[in-house]
Amino acid sequence: METNKNFTTSTDNGKGAAIVSYIFLIGWLISFFAIYKENKTSLSTYHLRQSLLLHLSIIVINILITIILTIAPLVFLAYISYAIGIIYLVFIVLGAISASNLQNKPLPVIGDKAQTLFSSI
């Protein structure tokens, strides 16, 4: 019996891929390769772009702070690192709420930049 692989029974309009993409970088990878490839929607595309920029920017920021702390161990930079981590979690929650409400609401600071940087997604 032959099955039609192009047939999808998904009714979530990309909501699942959009929400899962905010679950740190592993969630983005799962969302992109397992969910998004079969069900491309404007909602999932929008949130995949935003969450990718969010995850990549936190990785770069943490690497820079680690390098600076190894060169000059300044205590206030450690506190800034904690604050950045809290801001990162707040952005994850904001993005996931926007995705669950089926809204294309940009995240503060990075939302619009993500749409232009990752237009190929």
Image (cartoon, rainbow, N blue to C red):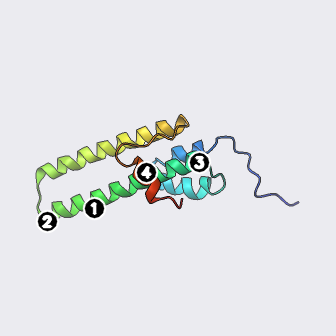
Query: What numbered label is drawn on residue 5?
Result: none
Q: Quick check: marks 3 and 4 in contact, CB under 8 Å?
A: no
**If you read the primary sequence from the N terminus, does the residue marked by circle 4 or circle 2 appear first?**
4
Q: Quick check: marks 4 and 1 in contact, CB under 8 Å?
A: no
Residue at (42% x, 39% y) in the render: 93
Q: Which residue is most to the top?
A: 101
Looking at the figure, which quarter contains the N terminus? bottom right
Report which residue position mark 3 lands on. 42
Mark 2 falls on what kind of element?
A: helix
Residue 114: image location, x then y, percent: 43, 53
Report which residue position mark 1 lands on. 63
Closer to the camera: disc 2 or disc 3?
A: 3
* Left or right of 39 in this view: 108: left
**If you read the primary sequence from the N terminus, does the residue marked by circle 4 or circle 1 appear first?**
4
* Left or right of 32 in this view: 76: left
Residue 58: image location, x then y, percent: 33, 54
Residue 79: image location, x then y, percent: 18, 46
- The residues tagged by marks 2 and 3 sit, at their Cα atoms, a distance apart of 44 Å
- The residues tagged by marks 1 and 3 sit, at their Cα atoms, a distance apart of 32 Å
Report which residue position mark 2 lands on. 71
